[in-house]
Image (cartoon, rainbow, N blue to C red):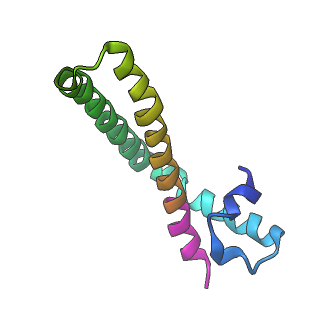
Amino acid sequence: MNFKRLAKHFPELATKTPAEQQALLTQAYQNAFAAEHKMKLWRSNLLSALLMAGLCFLFVLVLRPALGMSQQTSAIVLMLIAFPVYFFIQQRRFINQLRRSLHKLLP
């Protein structure tokens, strides 16, 4: 984990020293992604991947013919829009899980 980049997402840690920030983020990460949460994390990741795949199939099978797009154009649209959006959503979910765990640690 790059703690310097990750600390930018948590303004509540701005008053702490970098060593304290790193220790808190490490502990929050260990609490949020501990072994007892693995099945819940797997399930949520699997559901989001299935939802994304379903939306992409909907786009390819229904919207692409309705809009009159070629196969190449629809593939480019999916790669340039859908794929980065999926990664952005996953990153936001990761940060929100970390934030919930961090708020449990902070007084």
Left or right of 78 in this view: 19: right
Left or right of 13 in this view: 54: left
Is 101 in front, or is 6? 6
Identify the magenta region: 97-107
In the rendered view, tell whether residue 12 sits above or below residue 10.
below
Q: Residue furthest top?
A: 71
Percent coordinates x, y for residue 89 in the rendering: 45, 48
Is 23 in front, or is 84? 84
Q: Residue furthest bottom?
A: 107
In the rendered view, tell whether residue 83 sits above or below residue 76.
below
Q: Quadrant of the C terminus?
A: bottom right
Percent coordinates x, y for residue 35 in the rendering: 52, 49
Looking at the rendered structure, the number of numbered marks drawn on it comes to 0
**Residue drawn 40% across the image and 35% down it:** 82
**Residue drawn 32% across the image and 14% down it:** 71
Examine the image and state in which quarter residue 17 appears: bottom right
Is 65 in front, or is 48? 65
- Of helix, strand and loop, which mostly describes the magenta segment? helix
**Residue drawn 50% across the image and 60% down it:** 97
Q: Is residue 59 magenta?
A: no
Percent coordinates x, y for residue 58 in the rendering: 22, 29
